Image (cartoon, helix red, strand yellow):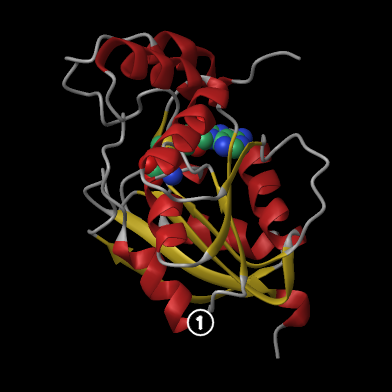
Amino acid sequence: MERKYYEAYDDRYKKVHSEKNLAWAGEGHSPTIEALLKKHGATEKSSILEIGCGEGQNAIYLLSKGFNVRASDVSPEAIRWCKKKAKEQGVSGDFFVMDILRNNFTQKFDFIYSVAVLHMLVEQEDRDKFLRFVHDHLNEHGKAFIIVMGDGVETRKTDASKAFELADRPFWDETIQVATTSCRMVTWQHFLDEIDRANLKVLNHFLDRTIAGFVVSMVAEVERKDFSN
Ligand SMILES: C[S@@+](CC[C@H](N)C(=O)[O-])C[C@H]1O[C@@H](n2cnc3c(N)ncnc32)[C@H](O)[C@@H]1O
């Protein structure tokens, strides 16, 4: 199957893992996710899906706290890394490769969360598909937490055809944290409108400066419109 621009992160992970044996995104988890899960009543029995888990810092942390997380990413290298890290830390969990935009996945969840993934999707068609996936894989009263890079004011859009070229940049490049492969930052209005188009209702939204690896992120807590009261 043709490799899509958003798969370029796999090259980036391979490079940093093999050249430096280091996690690209570091080891720190983002406390917001656990706080939101608790706020919305998640228990050890709740089913939770992470989309685009990367090197697993959030999923491994939540699994270590007893949450029932299945963690997915389109990058086989990221998933290999997650399995290795989880084993080293004595945590058992289910890490699997899945392209959020091309799959036959049918399981539904009580909670879905995703950190810094939607901003990698530069084409609107792909962003709409991502949000539709969230909608279609939430249980009736399920909640999702979508966290994206940006402050809701500044906008940016890289050229999707350059993603593999950008992934190949050296690590000392000072712009490494920004637009490493593909990146689209949108306004709050744009973000809220695309969520709405996916038949999801925004329960709350805010800016967060505690997301690991990002200066500022936008957070939306959502549920399915078709089941909300
Ligand atoms: C910026 S990284 C963030 C990783 C992790 N959530 C974190 O906070 O460090 C974005 C992740 O999204 C994954 N990704 C991009 N497009 C995807 C898709 N279509 N399906 C699943 N994962 C995807 C990438 O492979 C990468 O691991």
Residue at image coords 70%, 45%: 129
Q: Which residue has dot 1 on it?
A: 40
Quadrant of the frame with the N terminus: top right
Q: Residue at x 53, y 14 (%)?
A: 161
Q: Is mark 1 within 8 Å of ligand 1?
A: no
Q: Is residue 183 above or below residue 68?
A: above
Q: How many labels, in total?
A: 1
Q: Quadrant of residue 72?
A: top right
Q: Quadrant of the C terminus?
A: bottom right
Is residue 62 rendered to the left or right of residue 5? Answer: left
Q: Pinpoint residue 64: horizontal percent, then vertical percent.
A: 41, 60
Q: Residue 27: in sight, yes or no?
A: yes
Q: Quadrant of residue 76?
A: top right
Q: Residue at x 47, y 66 (%)?
A: 220
Helix, strand or loop at mark 1: loop
Tell me if 145 is positioned left or right of 101 in this view.
Answer: left
Front residue (pair 174, 53): 53
Tell me which amino acid carries mark 1. Answer: His
Answer few, some or many: residues within 10 Å of disc 1's Cα (few below 14, many 20 plus, some between 14 and 19). some
Q: Is residue 15 above or below residue 111?
A: above
Position of 132 relative to 182 (above/below): below
Residue 155 position in % (x across, y down): 36, 42
In the image shown, does 143 or 155 lie closer to the viewer? 143
In percent of the image, x 36 and y 45: which residue is there? 89
Give above or below for 69 relative to 11. below
Quadrant of the image occupied by residue 143:
bottom right
